[in-house]
Image (cartoon, rainbow, N blue to C red):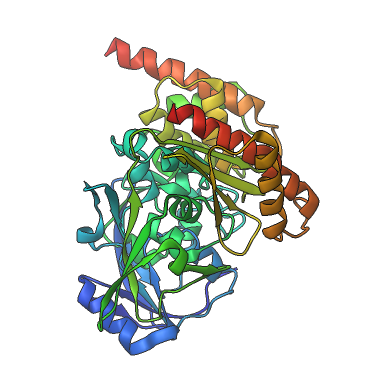
Amino acid sequence: MKPPPFDYARCDSMDEALSLLAEHGEEARVIAGGQSLMAMLNMRLLRPSVLVDIAELDELNYINDSSGWVEIGATTTQAVLESWPGLNSRLPLVAAAIPHIGHFQTRNRGTICGSLCHADPSSELPLCLAALGGEVVLRSRRRKRVLNAKEFQVGMLTTAKQDDEIMVAARYPAAQRGFGYAFRELSRRHGDFAIVALAGVAGGGKIRLGVGGLAEAPMVREWDDHLKDEDLADALNDFAWELRGSDDIHATARYRREMVRRLGKKVIDEARRCAS
Amino acid sequence: MRLLKQGERHRVRFTLNSEPVEGLAEPRMLLTDFIRHVIGATGTHVGCEHGICGACTIRVDGKAVRSCLMLAVQAEGKRIETIEGLAAKDGSLSTLQLAFHRNFALQCGYCTPGFLMTLAEYLEKHPDPSEQEIRLALSGNLCRCTGYAEIVDAALEAAREMRAQAAAE
């Protein structure tokens, strides 16, 4: 339960960090808050040869609210976003999801971008990014590129980020007028990994549901908001089966499907009420 | 950039409960182990070592964090507070500690430093919490003895007393 040996680089600039990644490739790991990575190192699930610490890069510690997007820098912690005065009005879905992320002590160090890069299938911030149609900004020595959530989130603990890239920012679309947002999560105890997490968006004649905790990555479906209740129930049932959830010690696959059907409906109704 | 090689020990300096401290650590050394074994401040306890139990909670620049999810080398230059810093220099216990004592909010005591450091930050930021809010704030700290009821009582009592003290000042 102690980390394996590695070199440690405390970076003073993004260029230093990118050079180390270019040099070491898959042998290197970026650390900022470390609230997922440190646990994996302690359990020796990872054995990087060098840890590239970007936590002290203050230029990446920002929340930038402009032109319909809220951009969050790589070293901005979950606690900083949680106490951002604009959170409830600009990112109501994220505001509802944040209290479910671990505990306040882990949110004090854990970063938004770190959670997106870790890409646990049950975690809240990747689900919100998927449900809202957000983007991530990746940088390497070679290039800078922007990927949308669907391009970025490719599987369990896996993203489209290359070994020489750092996620420098995440961009969440800000709340739109006339849209409603809702979030629910089911876990045995507060702060546990979600058995099922659901994010609902209603507005513009559409309803959208994102589900975490079942598939290998967050999955999102969108329907016309004029669906009759029985047609929506059929659509949710189809979605629940398509997610291919499995049995584990926390819940059966059947139970998870039922939660998608029932809580899915509740989340959609709640988003609709918020929209009206 | 500071590049620290594996297998070598490097000097780490920070302030611990307002006193400057320093010692040598390999890059892979956890902050918990550094505080306990290198500095010798054994009040901080180690439970699960993967961020679940909360026993190792300390404050870094005022924020309650898991010291098992932080490297000693990441603490360079930080302001660190541990359970040893809660009581006054003459050994008299803090309001929070006295409330734990009166309410039997510990049995074996292993988890207690983590609970106290968690509540130290939480009650500073939320001076008038409800019982439910206290339970939520403590959800990241595990106690296998008490069943939590006494800990919640102690936290509510400490909050009341701290509010009265603040009003009297």
Q: Residue furthest bottom?
A: A23
Q: Residue at x 65, y 31 (%)?
A: B148
Q: Quadrant of the C terminus of chain A?
A: top left
Residue B149, image quadrant: top right
Q: Position of residue A274 (x, y in %)?
A: 46, 29
Q: Position of residue B158 (x, y in %)?
A: 47, 21
Q: Residue at x 57, y 55 (%)?
A: B46
Q: Residue at x 66, y 53 (%)?
A: A239
Q: Nearer the viewer, residue A247 or A43?
A: A247
Q: Compared to A16, does A69 lie above or below?
A: above
Q: Is residue A231 left or right of residue A120?
A: right
Q: Compared to B116, does B46 lie above or below?
A: below
Q: Nearer the viewer, residue B10 or A239?
A: A239
Q: Is residue A54 left or right of residue A219?
A: left
Could you tell me if residue A34 is visible in this image? no
Q: Position of residue A70 (x, y in %)?
A: 29, 49
Q: Residue at x 31, y 86 (%)?
A: A22
